[in-house]
Amino acid sequence: MTEFDPAQHRMVPQQRWFEDFTLGERFVIPSRTMTSAVFAAFQAASGDTHPIHYDVEYCRARGMPNLLAHGFQTLIHTAPGSGLFPFMVEESLVGFLEQSSRFLKPVFADDTIYPALEVTELVPGRSTGVVALRSTVFNQRRELVLEGLQKFLIRRRASFPVITGTEGGPSSRTGRWSRKPQKTPIN
């Protein structure tokens, strides 16, 4: 019999640090069908009592096929905790800095949504860095219904040197990593 160690009881055994992330890396969040139970849970948690979110006949009288999801009801499915991201950064996460979203198409009851996060920017600092994630939600009709941005402050490895001005690395002008590698002349 082996001795149990709670510190080894992790969803993702290998922890990640700022420099472990790469531009374009995707984190898929499990799909979910927006059932009436999901609608009821969101209504109870949010306190939003507008009939467009709970009265099917009210919606049909206004030309909608079913209950209309509140924008935040769709947004919450992009929470990194819905996927593996926060388990990867349990030791290195400093904080959640910012979130913004645009609601592009309606989401109705019985729609299935497919959320994901993608690394779009890496901004290194001395001991931490900002990881910017583009959040997207598609529906079963392959329509983009939500897109947004989330930023996290992640610790760097203590022994990781700061490299600037190299192709594929941070720009010497801005210090930011960009989606496209930049060539910087060596003087």
Image (cartoon, helix red, strand yellow):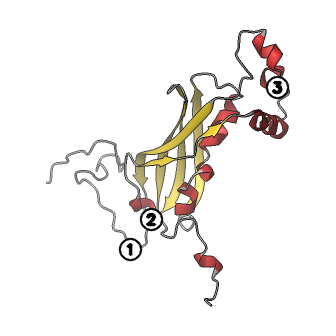
Query: Mark 2 is on which residue type?
Result: Arg
Quarter holding the C terminus is bottom left
The residue at the point 77 percent across, 15 percent down is 59
Kindly state the secondary structure of the residue where label 1 is placed.
loop
Q: Is residue 11 above or below residue 178?
A: below
- Marks 2 and 1 in Cβ contact (< 8 Å): no
Dot placed on the residue nearer the N-terminal end, 3 or 1: 3
Question: Is there CB contact under 8 Å for labels 3 and 1?
Answer: no
In the displayed structure, would residue 162 be above or below residue 62?
below
Viewer-closest of 135 and 63? 63
Q: Nearer the viewer, residue 154 or 42?
A: 42
Describe residue 34's horizontal placement relative to residue 83 as left or right: right
In front here: 17 or 185?
A: 17
Between circles 3 and 1, the one closer to the viewer is 3
Q: In terms of secondary structure, where does tag 2 sit?
A: loop
Alpha carbon separation for disc pair 2 and 1: 8 Å
Where's residue 3, x and y in %?
Answer: 63, 88
Badge 1 density bin: few <14, some 14–19, many ≥20, Cα 10 Å = few
Gap in Å between the C-alphas at discs 2 and 3?
A: 46 Å
Q: Which residue bears the numbered disc 3?
A: 54
Left or right, residue 83 beside residue 68: left
Residue at the bottom extreme of this rendering: 1
Whole-angstrom CA distance, mark 3 to mark 1, is: 54 Å
Residue at 58% in and 77% down: 8
Give the residue at mark 1: 159
Task: Name the residue tied to disc 2.
Answer: 156
At horizontal 73% and vertical 20% (from top left) the residue drawn is 66
